[in-house]
Amino acid sequence: MRILGISAFYHDSAAALVEDGRLVAAAQEERFTRKKHDAAFPYHAIDYCLDAAGAKLSEIDHIAFYDKPFLKFERLLETYIALAPKGFRSFQMAIPLWLKEKLFQKSLLSKKLKELDEDVTSDRLLFTEHHLSHAASAFYPSPFEKAVVLTMDGVGEWATTSAAMGEGNRLEIFQEIHFPHSLGLLYSALTYYTGFKVNSGEYKVMGLAPYGEPKYAKLILDHLIDLKPDGSFRLDMSYFDYCTGLTMTNERFAKLFGAPVRAPDQLLTAFHMDVAASIQAVLDEAVLRLTRSLASRTGARNLCLAGGVALNCVANGKVLRDGKFDHIWIQPAAGDAGGAVGAALAAFHQFKGGARSVAASDGMSGAFLGPEFSQSEIERRLAEAGARFSVLNEDEMIEATAKALADQFAVGWFQGRMEFGPRSLGARSILGDPRSPAMQKNLNLKVKYRESFRPFAPAVLREDVGQWFELDSDSPYMLIVADVRADKRRTMSAEERALFGIEKLNVARSEIPAVTHVDYSARIQTVSAETNPRFHRLLMAFKAQTGCPVLVNTSFNVRGEPIVCTPEDAFRCFMGNELDLLVIGNCVLRKSDQNPALKQDYSSAFELD
């Protein structure tokens, strides 16, 4: 039985294909269209999933959509009616769009599916509730026979926070918190207030938080959110404008903090860092209260997390260290893209009653579910793009890449199937030497073209993680933050402070400064030979040359662009930044060998993110 899952029309459209309960392919539409967070119907992602399965769309048994449009419209209409006449301008903009296409999404989906295959019939369409899709994406691929599932996001149809119990092939939501009260929207409101883009800049707030102090946490708890001991909460909506307005916050919100909304091009100050630290502290506390309450109430020893808030790896790390659950598993595509996976799995297990097989590690195949290219195809595509490259055998390629990294080169690394979800995990990655004090700044400013404060993640051999970090469990999807071990720490030297323009005397540093944040924390990815053997081999070779089993791992893109998908994407990105080396399959490309006429200009992309 084949089931296709689809998420679309809001942000991060995606498709996923399940065969007899096994996830075989998944991809986000943005990777093909090169439009970041693309919300359009995922034609290209669907085509890829069908190709990966060797099937036509008309051969798919069911097509599952990740939410229920009528319920979402009900919430929209009830909100406007309850708050009328406020929000009439927003109502005028939203309702025509809904009446034109979103309300009649079954017809719209049928029409678009027929464009792909005219033999597809609408009776194959199924719709799952948004939070059930999220919960299914977390529980069914997890390595647990039984677990409690916590979903937290902005909003689905009505739910913003939900708890479910999963056992075997059954999954049941037993508790919800409804719109407009939302941890995701609270965090997004502060994201907007600090000058970052909602639905894409929340991780910037998380990265900025360690630079500040949580001076405004009490202010937030006293005025913005009434947080109960069991984790339930209500927001004071008199400070927010997202129900019926065109912005996240209002003038009363700005007066509360004593400053206007930061413009995106305005300098970040200590005030903005303190606001970021404060909302992160409040989120940490809210999530901890929720998970402690669920552990006490259900007696469950396993926890699954999904929804956009589950991408907050700082909060995830605190839940893990809190110890109320023995094991935690987080869906790597926890946001809306992962809803495509959940919709397909929910259809198979919930609607069709399909049996569930629990994988030893998990059912996500390391999140390596996207397109891959054979060596001959890579060589052909690179040659047609005008690239100049040498072809090595695998041993030579691994050794040459490890040496380049040890020599402080920044390397583009393109291997195997593309990752599904927002993180690069060693298939479409930019790599660097974590021992270099200058690597973080250089990668941010000269390769990624983004803010210099942004931290980078360490990819570390799974067998060595406990020797370098205060973590001794799997973190394959870069979704857990933990501290660098005390015996690896040191403070920043005067030379390093001058390099970064930092006057503060005691800035956190370590033997791996490029992946150590200012509070000694790191967003860790553990790499195992089972899920990513070639990347594991590279880490082993780098360790043999340097004694360090860690590499800087960041997404293979520049600011404003999605992660690369094809060899051509990788070559264009390589020619548009200051990467020194590009390794695609067994092809090795040096920047100095390339035709200068092929240089790309990404300056227009800098303003898009």
Image (cartoon, grey):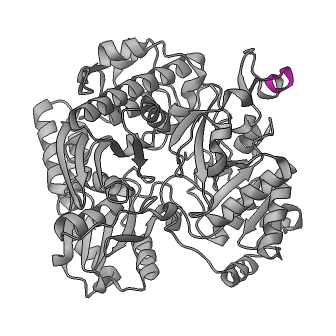
Q: Is residue 240 magenta?
A: no
Q: Which residues are magenta?
A: 492-497
- The kind of secondary structure the magenta stretch mainly shows is helix
The reply to whether residue 542 is in sight is yes
Image coordinates for residue 371, horizontal then vertical, percent? 54, 72
Give the camera-side residue of 109 and 514: 514
Q: Is residue 41 above or below residue 308?
A: below
Q: Is residue 551 above or below residue 242?
A: below
Q: Which quarter of the picture shows residue 246?
A: top left
Q: Which quarter of the picture shows residue 209?
A: top right
Q: Is residue 316 above or below residue 576?
A: above
The reply to whether residue 600 is in sight is no
Q: Is residue 102 above or below residue 5?
A: above
The residue positioned 11% from the left and 33% from the top of the image is: 82
Position of the C terminus, as image quadrant, is top right
The residue positioned 72% from the left and 55% from the top of the image is: 539
Give the camera-side residue of 486 and 594: 486
Position of the N terminus, as image quadrant, is bottom left
Image coordinates for residue 94, horizontal then vertical, percent? 24, 47
Q: Is residue 562 left or right of residue 556?
A: left
Q: Is residue 493 magenta?
A: yes
Q: Number of numbered discs present?
A: 0
Image coordinates for residue 503, horizontal then vertical, percent? 75, 16
Image coordinates for residue 288, horizontal then vertical, percent? 36, 28
Q: Is residue 387 left or right of residue 337?
A: right
